[in-house]
Amino acid sequence: MSLELLRKFLRSWLSLTAPIAVAMDATQADFDVHLLCCRKDVPMATAGLISFCKAWTGGPFALHIHSDGSLAQEDIAFLQKRFTGVQVHSNLDPTIREIMTAELPVGARVRYSQKSVLLQKILDPYCLSGSRPIMILDSDILWFKPPRLMVEHIERGCPHPLVSRGNGDTPFNFGSHAGFPPECSRLNSGVVLYRRSQLDRSILESFLESANLEIRLNSHFVEQTAYALALREFQFLPYRQYTIDLPKDGQTIFRHYTGPRRDEWLKENLRFLLKLPFQRPAQREASPQPVPAPV
């Protein structure tokens, strides 16, 4: 069976899952989850979010899915049936554009120039957020165990940003940002947990003003680099548990199947994915994980 047929089969299989309820208004949620999605990735994003919901042992969250412009109405209906209470945002949401134009005028100009769809990952959630923590998730992550460190971090008020670590340096041409700290180039934006006040708006605007998005790699890594520059005092999640390229074992909490590993996502986890719709949510575990070392 081809990978494309497997993806179609997976989408049909995931439609068998019982709807998962997420917080429907601000009074019910402890934090907000945001995920950018394209039409091709709907089955992957759905499976990833289901695995997150079933691994999460903390408080309730509001779920926001952002269309990159390719989601059809049938995709939106599919997602709304899987996650009761989800908010699906258009890439041209007028409310977001109005807020962004007022608060991040450079960001709005660059974002709506359509030079990099990935700017939606940093700018749109920022414009929708309030005082609650914001969690950014990529669509190509599967969660295998409860992320106790992240649960406890939110319960402590998210005192500083937590980010996932990449398996190499970001290939961004920094131009006038030549003093970019080396550790920042290792940030991967597959998972970002922060508060709005922890993202320096002036640094973000300055970076986007000078970023040359005509360079293909710059366009691809722009929001990841923007997070690395603008987030204050972020700390990395432990790479052994929150990984990209390490093999799954008993310590793996999530694995991020970035571009070169998209086929592995399906081949490596088919048995897990077939069981996923019928798994029970994880139970709260008391033993703490080690706190990640600051950068």
Image: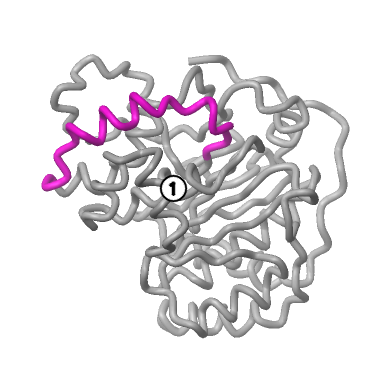
Residue at horizontal 40 percent and vertical 29 percent from the top? 201
Q: Is residue 106 left or right of residue 52?
A: left
Q: Residue 158 appears at what percent x and percent y?
A: 66, 27
Residue 133 position, x and y percent, is 64, 37
Q: Is residue 44 magenta?
A: no
In this picture, residue 105 sits left or right of residue 47: left
Asked if residue 161 is positioned above or below residue 254 in the image, the reply reads above
Residue 136 percent across, percent down from the top left: 53, 45
Q: Quadrant of residue 237?
A: top right
Q: Residue at the spot x=65%, y=65% of the render?
A: 86
Kind of element beneath mark 1: helix
Q: Is residue 151 left or right of residue 136?
A: right
Q: Amino acid at mark 1?
A: Ile
Indicate left or right for 103 with 289 as reference.
left
As displayed, is residue 208 above or below residue 16? above
Residue nearest the viewer, comparing 141 with 248: 141
Q: How is the image coloured?
A: one colour
Are there few (<14), some (14-19), or many (20+) residues within 10 Å of tag 1? some
Q: Nearer the viewer, residue 5 or 81?
A: 81
Residue at 18% over, 18% down? 178
Q: Position of residue 18 (x, y in %)?
A: 77, 76
Q: Which residues are magenta?
A: 192-215
Mark count: 1
Name which quarter of the figure residue 123 lies in: top left
Q: Residue at x 35, y 25 (%)?
A: 202
Q: Closest to the observer: 190 or 206? A: 206
- Pointer 1 residue: 99
The reply to whether the magenta stretch includes residue 203 is yes
> In the rendered image, which quarter contains the N terminus?
bottom left
